[in-house]
Image: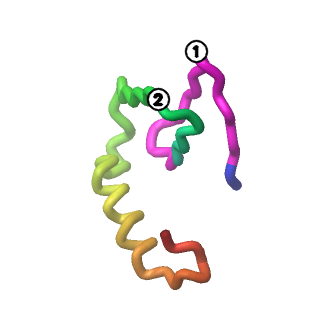
Amino acid sequence: MAEVAELDPGDAVYVPALWWHHVEALEEFNVLVNYWWRDVADYFDSPSSSLLHCLLTIKSLPPAIGRP
């Protein structure tokens, strides 16, 4: 289930560890800061490995399902 949040200047949003998210700029100038201040549990793989797995999975989807 997707959630959408439109932030105003000075707003922030907390995204829990390993939650996938998408950011879309609505103005010409935007600043995005990611900060991972703690490690995730040992049973999770690294975030970069998780991202690679996701991209490889999406790559094989047909365009009708929403492949970028």
Q: What whole-number distance in Å separates the C-alpha atoms at marks 1 and 2?
A: 14 Å
Mark 1 crowdedness (10 Å alpha carbons): few <14, some 14-19, many ≥20: few
Residue 65's spot in the image, x, y percent?
A: 60, 78
Residues 61 and 68: in front is 68
Looking at the rendered structure, the secondary structure element under dot 1 is loop
> In this picture, is 19 found above or below 59?
above
Residue 51 is drawn in which quadrant?
Answer: bottom left
Residue 66's spot in the image, x, y percent?
A: 58, 73
The furthest residue to the top: 10
Disc 2 target residue: 29
Disc 1 target residue: 10
Q: Which label sits in the foreground, 1 or 2?
A: 2
Residue at image position (57%, 22%) is 12
Residue at image position (60%, 18%) is 9
Query: Residue flagged by tag 1: what amino acid is it?
Result: Gly
User: In screen coordinates, is 3 left or right of 18?
Assistant: right
Residue at image position (35%, 65%) is 53
Residue 59's spot in the image, x, y percent?
A: 40, 75
Looking at the rendered structure, the secondary structure element under dot 2 is loop
Q: Are marks 1 and 2 in contact (CB under 8 Å)?
A: no
The boundaries of the magenta stretch are 3-21
Mark 2 crowdedness (10 Å alpha carbons): few <14, some 14-19, many ≥20: few
Q: How is the image coloured?
A: rainbow
Q: Is residue 15 magenta?
A: yes
